[in-house]
Image (cartoon, grey):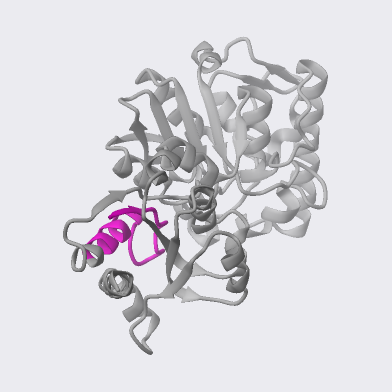
């Protein structure tokens, strides 16, 4: 029998790879001669680098970059495809997780470190990028990233703009002549699961600014500043992406990636499936096991188990999903490629215990399902 194991991480309990190994342990207890294809998944957010590097036998690169408030931080990215592809989580360099709650201020935070990760990867000779842009601390439209790559953003006095979304109102000229020329010869895919435009009531500042520390007054300032950034760029470079779906992701980084780096924005799980070649390994499988920490009706909206189930259903392969928590609305999943959805908890327990025994519980649940399959 052939099992394809393609879960996401179970947050705060186990990585996607550890979830695969727990599933494999349960399967082997019943079917010791089974073929288990380990394919750890992610949706472009936290854990994407780890999943792709472990699943595709890549390597992790660590380097010092500029953090969101200008401090030095150690960030990391992955190299896969024999070093031809770099996998970046912008949060590693420019993420909210790097800041204390009281230090969050999108008027000041920068994506400069994310641009440095691009340059470091280019120095390794990569030809393709996959960048996840969730978890950002920034609202600068990608200005810092662009400056790290050699784009000049100057005020009316010819001075380079400092970091942060709060100074973009001073932008007078955009000069891309100094941009790292290597960036034009690589392909850039962006894992983006939001559809917000750059500006307006549904834009980057209004929707995501408050969680990054923005007050209502700051939100208005940031939105006006991003609008000015987009207007100057449109007039001087004929780049008009402000109202494209996803432009508002990561404080406007989605816009910066599209307007200046010709990046392609797609759902995170779709990109991970593409990069891992999941469809090829699902062909001919007897069962697909997937899952993540919580599964409910929202799983249909681009979450990892749904993306995996959509691929498996193309080849009529049964899909069994495991979850630490099963919420409301899962009935709709049975009409969209899911054969069964299994909770892994053995009984009433505290959250701390559930997280601590996640691997053990998942292995036991997988074993129990396999005992049923053996019948």
Q: Where is residue 361 in the image (x, y as percent from the top left)?
A: 29, 75
Q: Is residue 66 visible?
A: no
Residue 197 lies, in percent from the top left, at 75, 43
Quadrant where the N terminus lies? Answer: bottom left
Question: Which of 360/111 is in front?
Answer: 360
The x, y position of residue 221, in whole percent, is: 78, 46
Of 297 and 49, which appears nearest the observer? 297
- What is the residue that sits farthest to the bottom in this orientation? 348
| Left or right position of 314 against 355 | right
Per the rendered image, the range of residues in magenta is 1-25
**Residue 360 image-quadrant placement:** bottom left
Q: Horizontal and vertical percent for residue 281? A: 37, 42
Locate residue 308 relative to residue 296 in the image: left or right: left
- In reply to whether residue 304 is colored magenta, the answer given is no
Drawn side of residue 76 relative to residue 130, left or right: left
- The total of numbered circles placed on residues is 0
| Residue at (49, 13) in percent of width and height | 182
Name the residue located 63 percent from the left edge and 68 percent from the top edge. Answer: 332
Give me the residue at 74% from left, 41% from top.
Answer: 198
Would residue 14 be seen by someone viewing this image from the given angle? yes
User: Which residue is more in the foreground, 370 or 200?
Assistant: 370
Does the segment drawn in magenta span residue 19? yes
Q: In which quarter of the image is residue 122?
A: top left
Quadrant for the C terminus in the image? bottom left
In the rendered view, tell whether residue 95 sits above or below residue 368: above
**On the picture, is 14 further left or further right than 192?**
left
Q: At x 65% / y 23%, what residue is drawn?
A: 260
Above or below, 173 relative to 35: above
């Amino acid at each position: 029998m052939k099992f394809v194991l393609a879960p996401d991480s179970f947050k705060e309990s186990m990585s996607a790879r550890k979830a695969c190994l727990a599933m494999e342990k349960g399967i082997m207890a019943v079917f010791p001669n089974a073929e288990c294809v380990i394919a750890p998944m992610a949706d472009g957010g936290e854990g994407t680098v780890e999943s792709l590097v472990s699943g595709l036998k890549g390597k992790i690169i660590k380097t010092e970059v500029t953090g969101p408030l200008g401090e030095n931080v150690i960030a990391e990215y992955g190299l896969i495809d024999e070093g031809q592809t770099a996998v970046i989580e912008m949060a590693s360099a420019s993420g909210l997780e790097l800041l204390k709650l009281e230090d969050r201020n999108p008027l000041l935070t920068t994506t400069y470190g994310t641009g440095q990760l691009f340059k470091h990867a280019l120095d390794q000779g990569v030809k393709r990028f996959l960048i996840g842009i969730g978890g950002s601390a920034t609202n600068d439209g990608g200005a810092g990233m662009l400056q790290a790559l050699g784009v000049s953003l100057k005020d009316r006095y010819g001075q380079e703009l400092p970091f942060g979304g709060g100074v973009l109102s001073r932008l007078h000229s955009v000069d891309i002549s100094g941009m790292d020329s290597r960036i034009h010869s690589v392909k850039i895919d962006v894992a983006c699961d939001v559809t917000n435009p750059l500006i307006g009531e549904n834009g980057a500042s209004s929707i995501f600014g408050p969680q990054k520390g923005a007050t209502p007054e700051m939100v208005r300032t940031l939105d006006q500043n991003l609008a000015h950034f987009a207007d100057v760029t449109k007039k001087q470079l004929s780049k008009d992406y402000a109202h494209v779906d996803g432009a508002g992701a990561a404080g406007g980084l989605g816009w910066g990636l599209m307007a200046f780096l010709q990046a392609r924005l797609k759902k995170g799980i779709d990109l991970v499936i593409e990069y891992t070649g999941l469809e090829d390994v699902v062909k001919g499988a007897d069962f697909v096991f997937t899952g993540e920490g919580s599964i409910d009706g929202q799983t249909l909206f681009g979450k990892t188990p749904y993306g995996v189930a959509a691929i498996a259903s193309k080849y009529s392969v049964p899909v069994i999903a495991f979850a630490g928590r099963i919420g409301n609305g899962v009935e709709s999943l049975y009409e969209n490629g899911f054969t069964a959805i299994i909770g892994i908890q053995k009984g009433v327990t505290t959250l701390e215990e559930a997280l601590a025994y996640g691997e053990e519980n998942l292995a036991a649940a997988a074993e129990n399902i396999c005992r049923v399959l053996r019948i």
